[in-house]
Amino acid sequence: MHRRRGVGVGGLRRKQQERERFKKKAEEESRVDAESVEKVLGTFKATLATFAEKHRQKIKDDASFRSAFAEMCYAAGVDPLRSNKGFWSGLGLGDFYYELGVKVVGVCAATREENGGLIALDDLLDRLDDDQVSTDDIKWAVSKLKVLGDGFRVVGDAVVSVPAELSDDSAVALDVATADGSISMEDLAKRLPGGDPTLRATTALAQLKDAGFAWVDGVDGKVYLPSLWLDARAKGR
């Protein structure tokens, strides 16, 4: 009867060496992949800079074109709003969005008493009264206002300018209410699959009321958001 022989010291050493070879090979391949990606991104950034130089004026004057350009920049890992180096600072986008951000803060402050710190993007755009500005521009500008704290942010098609605690469900409610400025607990529950939809909807609407963004109609039981409702009425919805 033969006994099975153990692997032995030599066998263990060989296995360890094999693991080390595999690890080294994997690290080499990862390094090559990273270098390849970096090279591609470098080429893309250079092409992007050439494109921007050629279309500099259109980027400044055309809101839709400017928004598409900003998206391309972020895809390439370039933030033209923050960069202060060479060509990118020459575009002046940082100054454009900084100045727009100041105007957004001004409008939000001036209207806070009437809307509680929640204003529809379209309403904000109308109040800015600038044909060269789009709602996408406002979103970019607001994203740079984080230095002011948690107050300024875009939720759905509205800008919140107070540090209210809003859940993802409340954000869904705001998005739905953009249509006509109102929402019912039943309608919201249908859009919140998983868990207890009714409880989630009730909690979300309570958050909006506690934040001062909404009130409940005593007749139809719907929850109305005054700023969004007025914007919808102005547009004939």
Image (cartoon, helix red, strand yellow):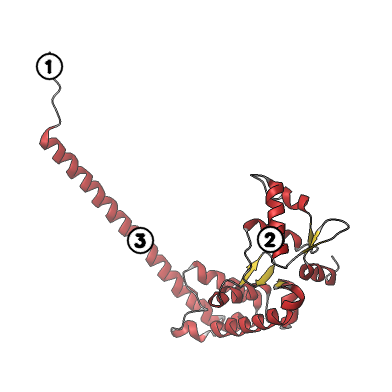
Q: Which mark is residue 207?
A: 2
Classed neighbour count for the residue bearing mark 3: other residues with Cα under 10 Å, few (<14), some (14–19), many (≥20): few
Give the residue at mark 3.
34
Q: Quadrant of residue 32?
A: bottom left
Residue at mark 3 to residue at mark 1: CA–CA distance: 52 Å
Chain-order first, disc 2 or disc 1: 1
Instruction: Give whichever of discs 2 and 3 has the lower sequence position.
Output: 3
Mark 3 or mark 1: name the one nearer the start of the chain: 1
Query: Quick check: marks 2 and 3 in contact, CB under 8 Å?
Result: no
User: Which of the 4 image quarters holds residue 233?
Assistant: bottom right
Query: Which amino acid is tagged 1?
Result: His
Q: Return the x and y of residue 235 as percentages of the image width and height.
A: 83, 70
State whether residue 77 is above or below residue 58. above
Give left or right: position of 64 versus 77. Answer: right
Residue 35 sits in which quadrant? Answer: bottom left
Q: Position of residue 154 (x, y in %)?
A: 64, 69
Q: Quadrant of the C terminus?
A: bottom right
Label 1 sits on a secondary structure element that is loop
Neighbourhood count class around disc 1 (C-alpha, 10 Å): few under 14, some 14–19, many 20 upward: few
**Quarter occupied by the N terminus:** top left
| Residue displayed at 27% across by 55% down | 28
Observer-nearest of 153 and 55: 153
For the residues labelled 2 and 3, the Cα–Cα distance comes to 45 Å
Q: CA distance from mark 2 to mark 1?
A: 76 Å
Which mark is on residue 2?
A: 1
Q: From what the image shows, is residue 85 above or below residue 19?
A: below
Which residue does the image show at 74% across and 78% down from the upper left? Answer: 113
Query: Is disc 2 surrounded by few (<14), some (14 to 19) or many (20+) residues within 10 Å?
Result: some
Judge left or right: residue 91 versus residue 25.
right
